[in-house]
Image (spheres, coloured by chain):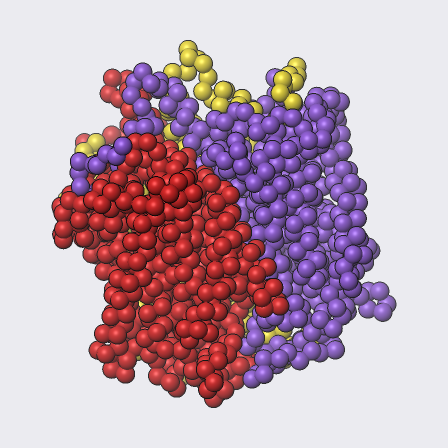
Chain colours: A purple, B red, C yellow
Amino acid sequence: MKRTRVLGGMGLVAALLLLWASPAGAQTAEEQVIQLGIDLNLLWVVIGAVLVIFMQAGFALVETGFCRAKHAAHVVSTNFAVFGLGFVAFFLVGYAFMFGGFSYGAFGYDTPLNADGLIGSGHWVFLWKSGFALTGKASVPAVMGFFLYMVAFMDTTATIPTGAMAERWKWKSFVGWGLFCGAIYYPLFGAWTWGGGWLSQLGNSLDLGFGYVDFAGSGVVHAMGGIAALTGAIVLGPRIGKFGSDGKPRALPGHHIPMAMLGTFILLFGWFGFNAASTFAATDVQFASVAANTAIAAAFGATIGMFWIWRRGGKPDPAMMANGMLAGLVAITAPCAFVDPWAAMVIGSVAGLLVVESVFFIERKMKVDDPVGAISVHGVCGVFGVLAVGIFANGKYGAGWNLTTTNGDGGVAGIIKGFENLDQLAAQAIGAAVIVVGFGLLSYAFFKIQNALTKGGIRSEEEHEIAGLDLPEMGVLAYPEFTQAHTGYVSAGTGAPVSSPTA
Amino acid sequence: MKRTRVLGGMGLVAALLLLWASPAGAQTAEEQVIQLGIDLNLLWVVIGAVLVIFMQAGFALVETGFCRAKHAAHVVSTNFAVFGLGFVAFFLVGYAFMFGGFSYGAFGYDTPLNADGLIGSGHWVFLWKSGFALTGKASVPAVMGFFLYMVAFMDTTATIPTGAMAERWKWKSFVGWGLFCGAIYYPLFGAWTWGGGWLSQLGNSLDLGFGYVDFAGSGVVHAMGGIAALTGAIVLGPRIGKFGSDGKPRALPGHHIPMAMLGTFILLFGWFGFNAASTFAATDVQFASVAANTAIAAAFGATIGMFWIWRRGGKPDPAMMANGMLAGLVAITAPCAFVDPWAAMVIGSVAGLLVVESVFFIERKMKVDDPVGAISVHGVCGVFGVLAVGIFANGKYGAGWNLTTTNGDGGVAGIIKGFENLDQLAAQAIGAAVIVVGFGLLSYAFFKIQNALTKGGIRSEEEHEIAGLDLPEMGVLAYPEFTQAHTGYVSAGTGAPVSSPTA
Amino acid sequence: MKRTRVLGGMGLVAALLLLWASPAGAQTAEEQVIQLGIDLNLLWVVIGAVLVIFMQAGFALVETGFCRAKHAAHVVSTNFAVFGLGFVAFFLVGYAFMFGGFSYGAFGYDTPLNADGLIGSGHWVFLWKSGFALTGKASVPAVMGFFLYMVAFMDTTATIPTGAMAERWKWKSFVGWGLFCGAIYYPLFGAWTWGGGWLSQLGNSLDLGFGYVDFAGSGVVHAMGGIAALTGAIVLGPRIGKFGSDGKPRALPGHHIPMAMLGTFILLFGWFGFNAASTFAATDVQFASVAANTAIAAAFGATIGMFWIWRRGGKPDPAMMANGMLAGLVAITAPCAFVDPWAAMVIGSVAGLLVVESVFFIERKMKVDDPVGAISVHGVCGVFGVLAVGIFANGKYGAGWNLTTTNGDGGVAGIIKGFENLDQLAAQAIGAAVIVVGFGLLSYAFFKIQNALTKGGIRSEEEHEIAGLDLPEMGVLAYPEFTQAHTGYVSAGTGAPVSSPTA
């Protein structure tokens, strides 16, 4: 049955609004305003997702800028490809493992896809089992919008190791990581926390505060990425030339500081989607406090990091400024909704100090080579952020948010509100320990097994690393026309790079 | 009559809200919530416009990164200037031609500017005629916000040929294209489709499904740009040195892979505005499905493109990864609101394959030189996207959206829902044919006539092309300080480039 | 008192919506829709803040791209660090000075933090005094979201001088400026205008129209930054080699045109948040007109600037295209809500001309060295924008916005609506004069005093400037691997730059 419009030649009909704001009797004003709030909440989450997806560009630029030119096409391509690889795996299976039991109240879609666990039940669920490839009940706007937000978080975890493992990682081994992270690694811890599994239930099962609380993922996203970055860097070993025969580290400076700075600004920009849209609702105005706290921690992290390295190293090193900002952002990510502005200032400042010290510790004491500082930024400051919830939470917020345990008397509280909140800090510490120990072992096992199963191992061939991975791995040079001093390659005419033994 | 506020020294008054939420009796709660929905819808469209405008930066970086350094200032400047040139022309006349008969229901402004056609009437309108320079009834927020969204789409079409025609296009000839595209080329097909003209009325006039349906412009924007890119590249001919004396193509690698990758990520980011805000309404929650489908197609396009070129060419070429993502995005643009997630996966995957094969076909079989792959990405995958509506549409959506033909029984359906929907596929095929044949001829004629009327033709002088267009055309070098191997120029001290016959 | 949820393993509860849309009796539909409007308004301001914060990346890229490679790490780092430095100072004290008396009606938080001035009272307030470090009543979402928006505006002012003073400014002296701008310089004029102080009260105190009106800060942000850029550049003096022994300027071309173009696009993108979210409300649909006017002025500024420099200098210089767009954006910032589209076109076009002429005037007549054109773009076009309100305002808008003086009969009107509106132009002229003279003197005094108190002055040492500031000031090179022709440094192997006396 077709209707032809009376007015010829018009584009947009008002049908949309007429349908939505249906005549009196069909929907009351109360129902209409609730529906409009639901629409707005979903819009906010989709806008947040778009911002988080753009963070991939930030990671790509930071990691590429802090690496050397001869590997630049390889580094930027790992950051590019991991978006698709992780996405594909998460779309097909990871999302179902993580969020199959999740409800979508803020978006007016109250029923979980399936309330039964694949492994575990009640307070002790370890994996869920529905929504594979967004089929069936998952193919509705509420779930699809939420999926988009969550796939972007997963890709952040997936891209963190590409920094610490840069300049010496085989492409095909990297591909394996991207798929593993999206399908299993990230969804597993995700199911235990944001998906409603056992860690989020510690408040119910063991009476530990609100259970493990992580507003936007200092732990779920950043520490999880950081620990994989650490184990991956250990399995790969340091880059050729990083440590001298005396065991002392040598500087291998990044090839493009403005690129890394731009990447940091893009990350700051996208982080507002990461944190502020984690209210899942514009009707929860806490998003404004979250956004402000996020910026406060970033500003203090960058500023304190700059002053600290200036004092410690004699110069206001640009890389440490950038890492200081990122450290503040990572650390505020878990507590951002639960703390006052002064606490955001403290958390950002501590993170700015911590990241500088951690970079030195990991390089000089642990002798682990992390070209971009990813382990310190995401791993160390991620763990700090998880614990900061149990220290600085002000007890004002949480009851209306997606806490699995709710407390009628108030919100999430840390030990600054009284030592009776040690149980909350304990829940946070358990979560942090699970990441560092449990997922440290899992990621280490993954890389070791992959290394054993791969002919020649997961590390690039020595001659490729010396010449630069771009041509042997990717088939192109990042900058075929710019003469490069360090690597000594001059491709003029022939297009062939000349490898240098001193590179 | 002035009122002085009682409270001295305050900035923002509550008058805004008081005016809006006027006292009971003046406006009912139902009216208030409808008004708030209208406000929100306009906001969503403006946010979408901002995202699409930012895509200009993405195009600039992709095209510049995939070109050579000696032309980089020229390529980036064409992408920059086309924003203003197309905008000025569309503002002054193009918008009036395209949307003079458009209504603005979702924004609470129901009357079209003028319901009479400039050329044609009833089901067969070819051009409209009101809203020139946004004067008169067009100078209201609803129309101005919509204009902003639409001018951004036009500029996407305008900037596509700057990629395929790069490195050999005279600046002043490019200026002519920018103005022509904004004033005539884009608005013409736009009037026939989104403006409510004859192609969108094929459902009413010839009973072909819902008429030509193109949610966000696989055809209206991308294929239209892609076909102009093809005809422009043919008229210009290939770059010096692209094809050897044996007719075989030679690789002229892009000078900056990270730049091109960043551009691709910016395009992905902006594309969410392009597609998801094309609901024109946040009260239509389909925007969330659209956004998720867009990402799914992008991720599968990039991933399948990467695996395909890896298998086919031996290396996971970064340019093909990037073009794979863009191909997925272009292809999903028309069907994104009408298909299920699994279909978005299929469409993105096919586009990822298609773009690789198309790049080879256009270069090796057609012997057309397209430095950045714009014809394949936007032209070929744009046509595929238009047809994909007629194949994969699930019949669930469309009745409330800006379809000129409405169907009370359901939404746009493709042949996967039954072969009775061949009429929809026929409408899509007619639209695609009009673009490829009709606008292929129009753009070819434009470039040929411009070529004949321009002293020396629209192609740059040979010596300029060899030395690089930057200095002769723009008066500056993109990178006056970096020594460049391929072009051989070393500007040290003198600032003068040395041209190389082997460039 | 804890509640365990009935459904195990779900994440997000509907409590949020249930709390918000409380049962009938508790909140009427009218109250609910007003609350939802408040939520939406706050969201719009937070989204605007995020866009404005991203503009920092734009400034960083424009300024770095237009400077030389040997200073690139220094220039990009000043733009990076100023975000944190200004932020920290504004957070601790600046915000309280500027907005302590501000009310937050659009966000449902009607009471100012403190309605008493620190200096002055009634119509003649010069500074406020509450909200230090966002403590006390300032620690609520409405104030924190508004703070985030406003701190981003402050940082724009702070970063403008880093362009004009680039390539010869000591890091530690720059640090002093960042803190001074965030704590005192910006908040002072801010308190007088947007904070509700004496300039905004000229309508009440001296009957001058609506008092000083500046919608989004042509004056408050841009001219304030531009005048500090001028005085700073005068105190520093021109770069070595900028003026020959004959006093004629020599071109010192920017090292990376695509970087500067990308930065310009990022600024355009962020500017929509800058201008359109300055309605402070999505319920005020004027945001759509503002966004369109902003784009119109940008497009005409870029296009007219391009044609003008093409005609005047023989080539369509990319730097002038970029500055033309920025000029249009700066000029439309004050009047964007008060003018018709045709006026936006005129304002943008005039700005496009003005910036070209101003760049020549400042360099050739005033002999001031401004490496990026910041004085012309932000200072000259900022003043033009302030005056444009008094010329082009159409009298339709303003009564509901945050005007301290309100006029029941209509909105802000300029002399195009009748010469009785000369009083509005007078208020604008007073504001402009206060910036140019008052804050010109203040910033000049700041730089002179800082120069006298700093050992060796605020200008970098000559040998550092010649070699490039990157290594001596920042400890790293921006591009340690790319061989650079102009500076002559080749770091091959040694990593040490070779300074060139001809640089």
| Quadrant location, the N terminus of chain B | top left
Q: In terms of depth relative to the viewer, which is nearer, C232 or A328?
A: A328
Q: In which quarter of the image is residue C311?
A: bottom left
**Is B294 situated above or below C3?**
below
The answer to whether residue C32 is above or below residue A148 is: above
Q: Where is residue B487 in the image (x, y as percent from the top left)?
A: 50, 82
Horizontal and vertical percent for residue A366?
Answer: 82, 55
Vertical comparison of B87 with C216: above or below: below
Total count of labels: 0
Left or right of A257 on screen, residue C142: left
Residue B292 percent across, percent down from the top left: 49, 43
Residue C338 falls in image quadrant: top left
In-image side of C151 versus C9 (left or right):
left
Farthest residue, direction bottom: B501
The residue located at (26%, 67%) in the rendering is B441
Give the residue displayed 62% in from the left and 68% down from the top.
Answer: B314
Q: Which residue is drawn at 65% across and 18% down?
A: C4
Q: Return the x and y of residue C219 as percentages of the image width and height.
A: 35, 51
Q: Can residue C422 be seen in this view?
A: no
Q: Is residue C482 visible?
A: yes
Look at 23% across and 79% down and name the residue there: B452
In the picture as drawn, the residue positioned furthest to the right comes out as A246
In the image, taking residue A492 as reference, residue A235 lies left or right, namely right
Q: Which residue lies furthest to the top in this view?
A: C25
Camera-nearest residue between B142 and C141: B142
